Amino acid sequence: MKPLGQYFDHTLLKPEAGENDIRRLCTEAKEHELYAVCVNSCYVSLCAEELAGSEVKIAAVVGFPLGACDTATKVFETTSAVDHGAHEIDMVLQVGALKEERDDYVLDDIKAVVEAARQGDAIVKVILETCLLSEDEIVRACKLAQKAGAAFVKTSTGFNAAGATVEHVSLMKKIVGDSMQVKASGGIRDKEKALAMIQAGADRIGASTLLV
């Protein structure tokens, strides 16, 4: 098992967060040797300044937190984030389209973001918002993300009714196997829960609380 800190995306997505909060986030990520910070796209440039010379990556959320903006908007936000220094894009899947079985739309939406991210050598994590989905819908979402070329499937935004569960992480890992990675995010506030997610198959943990 790799060092625990290397599982963590240190996350701050609250609307009231300001520049000083983001600076603190970056300082903590460096001090504790965490894998990445995860921020709203407007703070990518600031993170790039604060993390210069460190190994900490920058993840930016796109279409957050609803996933309901159109594909062109997600692509624009992705391109801007990558241009300003993002290494990873955490995009929200179009949940309504998935539930209506408009799989072609969902596939094309993810694929467009993946292609935009690749222009800057960035990877994409697809946020499924699992608390809104049935098991069959989670399976379908994982397969669509896989087909679109995303690197990760991710459980949750942390802004809905519930966050990550061990059961959903285990299911997602079973579907994608070694072809993709799984990020557990939302409601992970203690080390024991983080370790349970890793045991269930999570390759990365999104948490706003320092757990190392």
Image: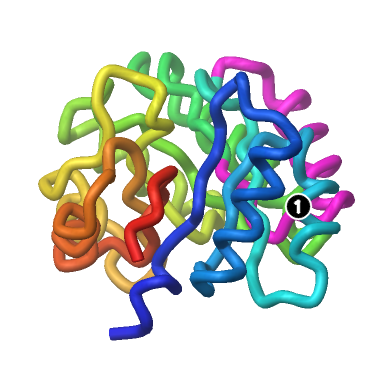
For this orientation, the residue located farthest to the bottom is 1
The verdict on residue 79 being magenta is yes
Residue 95 in the figure: left or right of residue 106: left
In the rendered image of this protein, does residue 72 appear above or below residue 23? above
Start and end of the magenta stretch? 68-90
The verdict on residue 35 being magenta is no
> Which x, y percent locates residue 140?
31, 39
Which residue is located at x 64 percent, y 34 percent? 62
In the rendered image of this protein, does residue 136 appear above or below residue 119? above
Which residue is located at x 17 percent, y 42 percent? 165
Which residue is located at x 67 percent, y 43 percent? 22
How many labels were placed on the picture? 1
In the rendered image of this protein, does residue 12 appear above or below residue 101? below
Q: Give the amino acid at mark 1.
A: Cys
Viewport quadrant of the C terminus: bottom left
- Considering depth in this image, is 207 or 129 the residue closer to the camera? 207
Q: Residues within 10 Å of mark 1 (few under 14, many from 20)?
A: many
Which residue is located at x 58 percent, y 48 percent? 38
Within the image, what quadrant is residue 175 found in? bottom left
In the rendered image of this protein, does residue 10 appear above or below residue 33? above
Residue 208 in the figure: left or right of residue 161: right
> How has the structure been colored for display?
rainbow
Residue 204 in the figure: left or right of residue 189: right
Q: Which residue is mark 1?
A: 47
Circle 1 SS class: helix
> Which x, y percent locates residue 112?
69, 41
> Which x, y percent locates residue 109?
61, 33
- Considering depth in this image, is 209 or 182 the residue closer to the camera? 209
> Which x, y percent locates residue 97?
45, 18
Viewport quadrant of the N terminus: bottom left
